[in-house]
């Protein structure tokens, strides 16, 4: 008789044949523009460490100080015994930074989405309008919400309007959720139009600003600030694992919203608080961002520079509006091979394939940071050009 668990072998074999099996590298050094892998140094062009905070001396120092005061673990979920003064201090500071009344700190951006959608739209008569390219954590949170999920075409405002009108007579709560910056293409949600449509149709607006936090807006204050929409976005979800360089998620907005999430959201009630080192490092990151916008400026400068250089060689970098720079290759196996060749030539940049991006649009997603020098970028781009020519992707 067949062993039931053996379906795994077949599935893994299939993934390997189709180029969908990820080769996960192990980093042996701190995150940074140069990382060590299997004892060798590589130019790192694929981490979300936008501002270079992952190994910033000020963050590291603040962690050491906090650990001396609070130890490491929170010991419980926030609602039982896991709320420490450092959590509250961070929540006040991030709310101030984002220009919101209040914020709650969760364990990750993924958890922050899980805290919002199922809590605000728990009923079968509720409706969630969702952009068709939303992040997996939003999709999973929609599934957990029990609401009817109505997908609209990616950033297509006519599609959204049509759906909003189609469901105008619905009886439940209505909510819209969108990525602020779409992480695979680097395009920005049309938030001013989205907000107008939602205000007209009585729809609550939820924006997941994972790739906008620390990147968009004045000094990295995020997408609401970027578009001057303070007070008109009902729920701002954010992550501290990208530009902030640490780990954690936030939900920000009106004080009552945050109070509601604190009391009712399952990730807050049933998963322990973020650890002391995480919170201390995040606090240091906000302090740096509150001081000046030097790192944010540098990030954008590097983003513009690498895009211009890659386009100059004829690479298709799609339509990114942010430092995220996709280099479209096409088929999954080609993207894989491109990644392997980059690696052989000292560049670390992982291919991204289905199901993370649609089939036929496999890519290398290039991510620069404020910590990259012009030399890092020039050397990295030169390797892209060499491999691109070898593989016939560019002339
Ligand atoms: C990365 C990402 C997340 C997940 O954030 P984590 O803090 O890593 O859990 C959620 N939403 C979007 C849009 C993201 O890009």
Image (cartoon, helix red, strand yellow):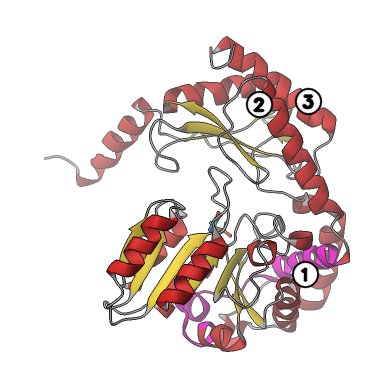
Q: Residue furthest left?
A: 1
Q: Is residue 281 above or below residue 335?
A: below
On the image, the x and y values in percent for residue 124 come to: 26, 76
Residue 146 picture quarter:
bottom left
Label 1 Cα crowd, 10 Å radius (few <14 / some 14-19 / many 20+): many
Between 41 and 352, the residue placed more toward the observer is: 352
Tell me the mark number nearer the camera, choosing from 1 and 2.
Answer: 2
Q: Which circle's residue, 3 or 1, is located before the other in the chain?
A: 1
The one of 290 and 62 positioned closer to us in this rendering: 290
Q: Position of residue 126 (x, y in %)?
A: 32, 77
Mark 1, residue position: 283
**Image quadrant in which you'd find residue 275:** bottom right
Disc number lying in front (2 or 3): 2
Residue 378: numbered disc: 3
Q: Secondary structure at mark 3?
A: helix
The residue depicted at 72 percent of the width and 73 percent of the height is: 94
339 falls in the magenta region: no
Cα separation between marks 3 and 1: 33 Å
Q: Secondary structure at mark 1?
A: helix
Identity of the residue drawn at 77% across and 77% down: 70
């Amino acid at each position: 008789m067949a062993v039931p668990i053996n379906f795994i072998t077949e599935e893994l074999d299939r993934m390997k044949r189709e180029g969908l099996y990820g080769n996960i590298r192990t980093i042996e050094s701190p995150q940074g523009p140069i990382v060590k892998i299997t004892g060798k140094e590589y130019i790192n062009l694929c981490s979300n460490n936008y501002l270079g905070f992952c190994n910033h001396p000020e963050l590291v120092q603040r962690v050491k100080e906090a650990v001396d005061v609070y130890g490491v673990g929170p010991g419980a979920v926030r609602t039982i015994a896991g709320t420490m003064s450092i959590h509250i201090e961070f929540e006040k500071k991030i709310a101030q930074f984002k220009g919101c009344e209040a914020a709650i700190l969760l364990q990750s951006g993924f958890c922050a989405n899980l805290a919002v959608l199922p809590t605000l739209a728990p009923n079968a008569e509720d409706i969630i309008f969702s952009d068709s390219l939303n992040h997996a954590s939003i999709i999973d949170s929609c599934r957990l919400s029990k609401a009817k999920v109505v997908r609209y075409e990616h950033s297509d405002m006519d599609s959204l309007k049509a759906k909003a009108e189609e469901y105008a007579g619905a009886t439940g709560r209505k909510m819209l959720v969108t990525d602020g910056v779409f992480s695979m293409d680097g395009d920005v949600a049309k938030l001013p139009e989205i907000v107008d449509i939602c205000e007209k149709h009585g729809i609550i607006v939820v924006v997941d600003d994972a790739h906008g936090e620390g990147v968009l807006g004045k000094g990295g204050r995020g997408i609401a600030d970027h578009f001057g929409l303070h007070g008109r976005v009902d729920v701002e979800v954010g992550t501290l694992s990208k530009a902030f360089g640490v780990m954690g998620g936030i939900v920000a907005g009106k004080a009552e919203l945050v109070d509601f999430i604190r009391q009712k959201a399952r990730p807050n009630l049933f998963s322990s608080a973020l650890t002391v080192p995480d919170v201390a490092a995040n606090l240091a990151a906000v302090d740096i961002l509150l001081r000046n916008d030097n790192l944010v400026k540098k990030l954008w400068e590097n983003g513009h520079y690498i895009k211009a250089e890659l386009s100059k060689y004829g690479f298709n970098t799609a339509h990114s509006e942010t430092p995220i720079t996709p280099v479209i290759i096409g088929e999954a196996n080609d993207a894989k091979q491109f990644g392997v060749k980059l690696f052989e030539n000292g560049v670390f940049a992982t291919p991204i394939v289905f199901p993370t991006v649609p089939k036929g649009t496999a890519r290398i997603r290039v991510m620069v940071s404020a910590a990259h020098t012009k030399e890092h970028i020039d050397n990295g781009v030169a390797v892209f050009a060499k491999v691109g020519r070898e593989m016939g992707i560019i002339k």
